[in-house]
Amino acid sequence: MHTNLILKWLTAGTILAALILVNLSIFQKEQVLEKGTVVIMELVPVDPRSLMQGDYMALDYALALRLYQQYWLEGQTRPSSSGTLVVELDEQHRAIQARLSQGEMLKPQEVLMKYHLANRALHIGTPSYFFQEGHAERFEDARYGEFRVSSDGTALLTYLLDAEGKRIQP
């Protein structure tokens, strides 16, 4: 009987801890969406089949492609499997260049963004954008991804933008 009571309390404690962690994660993401720095990154074409499947669009970014070429094809020192980049922004908050973070002080027009290496590619931001089935044609003209980025470099994709920088509404 005593063992059953302990198991019930242990189960309740585990469920409570899981709920606290999930809600903390949601709160942190809401704070990034509300207070994060806007960063706009140019998209590069990826797999056109992802649009044809009807519910998501595979994404890659010009900045990540340039960094990959710089570190792998030009033979510079390769970055670790994950870390942060210092991303320089122009007046419209577009990412124009990046370098590996060395822990230096950031200039006003710079932000940190986390990266990771996987499948022989450098990944920054979100690799896909999900939308309602049947709305693929709205996103065919997407040229930029708009992110909100926290001070630690966590980036959340908020919108896709067209060539003029206008948000494409779902």
Image (tube, rainbow, N blue to C red):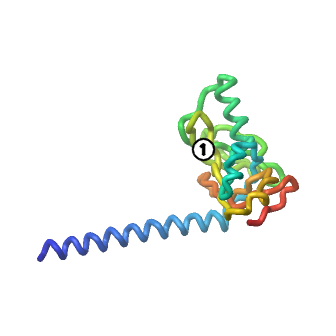
Direction left: furthest residue: 1
Tell me residue 166's x, y (percent).
84, 60
Which residue occupies 67% across, 33% down?
Answer: 68
Q: Does residue 163 lie above or below 11 as drawn? A: above
Direction top: furthest residue: 75
Q: Which residue is mark 1?
A: 115
Q: 10 Å neighbourhood of mark 1: few (<14), some, or many (≥20)?
A: many
- Viewport quadrant of the C terminus: bottom right
Element at label 1:
strand
Direction right: furthest residue: 164
Which residue occupies 19% across, 72% down?
Answer: 6
Residue 60 vs residue 103, the one in the foreground:
60
Q: How many numbered callouts? A: 1
Tell me residue 57's x, y (percent).
68, 52
Q: Amino acid at mark 1?
A: Tyr
Q: Does residue 168 lie above or below 127 as drawn? A: below
Q: Quadrant of residue 86?
A: top right
Q: Is residue 153 left or right of residue 13?
A: right
Residue 121 vs residue 156, the one in the foreground:
121
- Viewport quadrant of the N terminus: bottom left
Which residue occupies 68% across, 62% down?
Answer: 131
Q: Quadrant of residue 119?
A: top right
Q: Does residue 72 lie above or below 21 as drawn? A: above
Tell me residue 20's x, y (percent).
43, 70
Residue 114 vs residue 55, the one in the foreground:
55
Tell me residue 129's x, y (percent).
66, 56
